[in-house]
Image (cartoon, grey):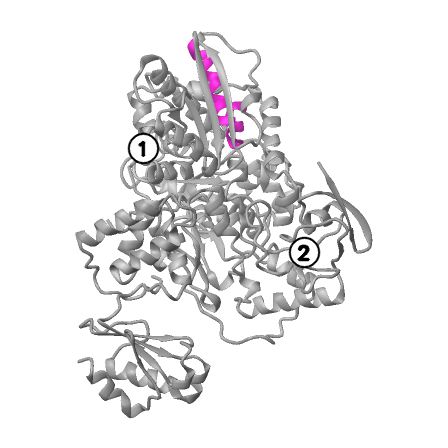
Amino acid sequence: MLERTQVPPFEGTKEQEKQLLAMIAAHKDERGALMPILQKAQDIYGYLPIEVQTMISDETGISLEKVYGIVTFYSQFSLTPKGKYHISVCLGTACYVIGAGDIFEVIEKKLGIKGGECTPDGKFSLDGCRCIGACGLAPVLTINSDVHGRLTLDDIDPMLAQYE
Amino acid sequence: MENIKLKINGIEVSAPKGSTILDAAHLAGVKIPTLCYFKEINEIGACRVCVVEVKGARNLVAACVHPATDGMEVLTATPQLIKSRKKTLELMLSAHDRRCLECVRSGNCEFQSMCQELGVEDSGFYDGDRPIHEIDTTAPHLIRDNNKCILCRRCTSICEQRQHVAVIGPNNRGFDTVIGSPFEMGLGDTSCIHCGQCVSVCPTAALQEKPYIDEVLAAIADPTKYVVVQPAPSVRTALGEEFGYPIGTDVEGKMAAALRRIGFDGVYDTCFGADLTIMEESEEFRKRLIDGVGKMPMFTSCSPGWVSFCEHYYPELIENLSSCKSPQQMFGAVAKTYYATEKKIDPKDIVSVSIMPCTAKKYEAGRDDQSAAGPGIPDVDYSITTRELARMIRKVGLDFRNLPDEKFDDIMGDSTGAGVIFGASGGVAEAALRTLVARLENKELKDVDFHAVRGMDGIKEATIHVAGKDVKIAVTSGMTNAKKILDQVRAGTSDYDFIEVMGCWGGCVAGGGQPHCDAETWNHTDVRGLRAKVLYDIDVKREYRKSHKNPSIIKLYDDYLVGGPGADKAHHILHTSYKKRKVNEFLD
């Protein structure tokens, strides 16, 4: 069959589901409700797996394909869970020419995952992103809300160690 | 309505206010090429093939969506425009599977013919990364090959807007954009209703029906098999289009001759099955209306696209569906029981083939509870589309236009005008009324024409006074139209008694298995109406116009289906059952 993104088993709680259904009920009659619903659903679950998108489709009457089409269009939405520490490497022009691509690859190797994925222990997830507006610090990445700038390949091990 | 005046290629044109440049150009007889544009369904200005120059505008504009304004000056065919269109096509071609020679749409591909018209060279000048897509064969009725897709979105628009199904859509973004189903599941895993409207609007071979031509020809060549064939009413109205006849040409006689020459052992007619459906359906309706047995209102069940829609989207209404099998299935069921007995053939040796204007019939043939002769002996073995029949005729080398006009074979080839009009929206209701009135009032109608239920409107209504009751009838086609009535029925606010529903807008004449018309033709021609007119013309010419007058049907009930319509034997052979499903059921 067609290739699907690999995701860990869904572990949503009853509490999260209750929150989701209440949130959808509050929004669903608004015009253009799908975007805010998806944003808040991602806040609740951290990502938008098939189980969550199906609940949104069933509750709003918007077809699952329409929901999925929008989720895959916007890079802000994620189909896979984020790790406890989410690493986002800037691959904008300034960072890229000064070596962010190498940094991205080294992190992939060290963590044993590809961009868009999460380590099996749920600790780290990795993504590339476009310019974050900190070109003066190039090459730059963020781990959750921490900013790490002017990185060299040697900085990577000690940086990750801070989050062990 | 207020008119505006503008100049197109220097010629003054008057057009109603609110027209697009494309509309205005059409009024002036100027053709602007279009590719993604499909009137009222896909007006998104995406492909940029219809670009024109507007005096004073900074950029080229898309004629299909750009409003025409008073005093506007438009040029439609300057060298700059031709160059721009050509480049657009070359860029599309750079990501396209260009093996046209082996392509099923070669010769009637809108993309191919536009490339030819604009002199596109297959130089590979823009070749670069080309995504390779896996072909989706999971659905029972169609194949999606995204290597042929040009992302025009006609399929997704018709699926969502006209059918209210929306199981396909654009996924991902930019270069990764692909038309598909949620979570990359195959179409066969979704709540697709198999109507095939996506196939009929696809400009290329990204979508085609799942073909069974080779299987059918192999069965014909097998001396141990007895192959019977039944073409649906709407096939005779459209098959001619594949051989150069104008839209709305009746080719019933040549079609029968072609089927005989292809080598089918018995050449029969689905219209016989349709007459049989009327016998059963009108009796079932009488029971619901007069005896109070079963839910009201009653929905027709001839259209498998509609039946799937009801099961998935309105599961609470499946008891309102008539339990009658469709004409295709009734014909197949009778072929493998009564006919097998009459001809002294083991039903296992009969291969039952149907020619349908429909892709959902392929799915219907494989449904549960559609094997009257016993488990493992399906009523219908292969269902092929009108398009596949045309391909088969060409493949075996028949000169269709010079075939004689022939008749169908006896036993299951007789049909009345009532059976023929099944192919047009409103036809089933009209045919049922002709028999119902006779049955309830014990007298024959003189005027059998019910004009109120004819025509191509999405919803039609009529009230017939019969047996002291006002029977309220609704006729609808296309699922978005039907939804309006279904919501009323579900809410309990509908006062209809009998509701004819067809999956495709206009009925089977515009089914997903009919010959391709390009968007230009659909946009400016009443394709549905022209095809439907053929059926009403045949109806007037038939010897009998009421199903219960069909001599072969009378004989069938006398000799085999003892007890008459709705009795145990008929019920066992000619009726089926339905299942409650969900919209999103793949997680179960």
Residue at the location (40% across, 52% down)?
Answer: A66
Residue B340 falls in which quadrant of the image? top left
Which residue is more in the foreground, A85 or B414? Answer: A85
Secondary structure of residue under mark 1: loop
Residue B337 falls in which quadrant of the image? top left
Identity, as a three-letter code, of the amino acid under mark 2:
Pro
The stretch drawn in magenta includes residue B432: yes
Q: Position of residue A108 (x, y in %)?
A: 29, 81
Residue at the location (38% across, 39% down)?
Answer: B309
Magenta residue span? B414-440
> From this viewpoint, is residue B230 visible?
no
- Which label was assigned to residue B372? 1
Q: Earlier in the sequence, mark 1 or mark 2?
A: 2
- Which residue does the numbered mark 2 point to in the structure image? B33
Judge the density around disc 1: few (<14), some (14-19), many (≥20) Cα neighbours within 10 Å.
Answer: many
Which residue is more in the foreground, B555 or B379? Answer: B379
Q: Where is residue B525 in the image (x, y as percent from the top left)?
A: 65, 41
Q: Where is residue B164 in the image (x, y as percent from the top left)?
A: 44, 42
What's the distance in space between the residues labelled 1 and 2, CA to CA?
Answer: 51 Å
Residue at the location (67% across, 67% down)?
Answer: B84
Whether residue A81 is situated above or below residue B317 in the rendered picture: below
The stretch drawn in magenta includes residue B93: no
Identity, as a three-letter code, of the amino acid under mark 1:
Ala
